[in-house]
């Protein structure tokens, strides 16, 4: 029996500077299997899946300063908004 190796997914890593305004973190991607977000900032990051307008009152979830989150089964755009602008978000889009 011949076996084929399992190929690891393509990983696209990006960095987005923090902003105290609605910011596109990852564009819509029909090939996305999952995405990871690391908040390398001293302030909260409010994240909204599927549409713009991320804020403290309009969010899917929030990531604490220095926090990490993984998103599964979402090919929609991902937006973010920091409580104050300092630092970055490091994102990995797994395809």
Image (tube, rainbow, N blue to C red):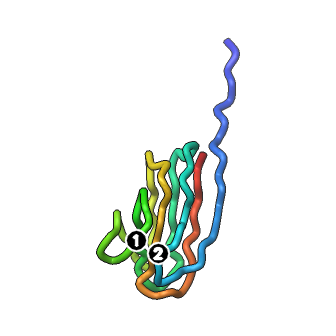
Label 2 residue SS: loop
User: Residue 95: x, y in percent?
Assistant: 60, 45
Q: Is residue 35 above or below residue 86?
A: above
Furthest toward the left, the residue is 57
The residue at 58%/43% (across/down) is 31
In the picture as drawn, the residue positioned furthest to the top comes out as 1
Residue 20 is tagged as none
SS at circle 1 = loop
Q: Position of residue 13 (x, y in %)?
A: 65, 61
Contact (CB < 8 A) between labels 2 and 1? yes
Q: Which residue position holds label 1?
A: 54
Q: Residue at x 33, y 77 (%)?
A: 56
Label 2 sits on residue:
22
Q: Position of residue 6 (x, y in %)?
A: 64, 32
- Position of residue 4 relative to residue 80, above or below, is above
Rounded to the nearest angstrom, the CA distance separating label 2 from label 1 is 5 Å
Q: Is residue 18 above or below residue 73?
A: below
Residue in the picture at 48% in, 61% down: 78
């Amino acid at each position: 029996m011949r076996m084929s190796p399992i190929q690891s997914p393509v990983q696209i890593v990006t960095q987005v500077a923090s902003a105290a305004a609605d910011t596109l973190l990852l564009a819509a991607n029909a090939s996305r299997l999952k995405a990871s977000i690391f908040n390398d900032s001293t302030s909260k990051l409010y994240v909204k899946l599927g549409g713009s307008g991320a804020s403290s009152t309009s969010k899917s979830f929030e990531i604490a300063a220095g926090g990490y989150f993984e998103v599964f089964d979402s090919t929609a755009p991902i937006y973010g908004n920091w409580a104050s602008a300092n630092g970055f978000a490091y994102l990995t889009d797994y395809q």
